[in-house]
Amino acid sequence: MRKREFYVVCHNIRSRENVGSVFRTGDAFGVTKIYLTGYTPSPPHHKISKTALGAESWVPWEKYGSISRLLKKLKRDGIRIIALEQSPRSGPIQKFRPRFPLALIIGSEVKGLSQKILRQADEAVEIPMLGRKESLNVAVAFGIAAYQIARFRD
């Protein structure tokens, strides 16, 4: 059922706990596969396992060296690339109407996603911030985006 495929690309996420949270949340929302790129840590590691509560054992994942090569491969496979990042071209997540199959890219806790990566994306979405802080924890942001995307999978 290709129309329901939902991939996640974790790029340069430094925290093992955040990676574990992505696995756990990915499991909750039926993510097809998680790609770990850049310096994102990969299982097995006790800090990932502690936060994932074992989800890293059954959610499919792959460590991929080059995010640019991965994004090109995904596009060749007909997968839409969606960046979760605040940028001038980002639209609010609550207005996003996903088309499947898609891959959501989430990035570094500090730097987010580079302009080069944003240029490779088909679309960019962001979570509007109403308080004083300009961003959310990457795992929390992923949870919000995964929920929004999952609403359209049925």
Image (tube, rainbow, N blue to C red):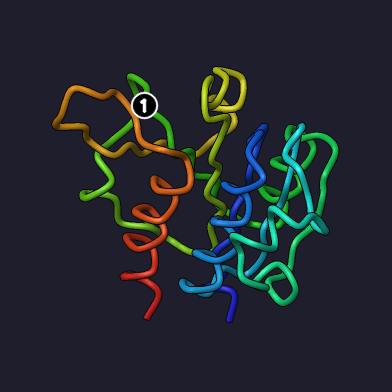
Residue found at x 56% / y 34%: 107
Q: How many marks?
A: 1
Q: Nearer the viewer, residue 40 or 89?
A: 40
Q: Where is 77 relative to 13, above or below?
A: below
Left or right position of 108 against 64: left
Residue found at x 49% / y 64%: 25
**Residue tagged by mark 1?**
86
Quarter of the image where one finds residue 101: bottom right
Percent coordinates x, y for residue 79 in the rendering: 60, 55
Percent coordinates x, y for residue 70 in the rendering: 76, 43
* Residue 51 visible: yes
Percent coordinates x, y for residue 26 in the rendering: 54, 65
Q: Nearer the viewer, residue 129 or 99?
A: 129
Q: Nearer the viewer, residue 17 or 110?
A: 17
Q: Amino acid at mark 1?
A: Gln
Q: Quadrant of the N terminus?
A: bottom right
Q: Secondary structure at mark 1?
A: loop
* Residue 123 visible: no
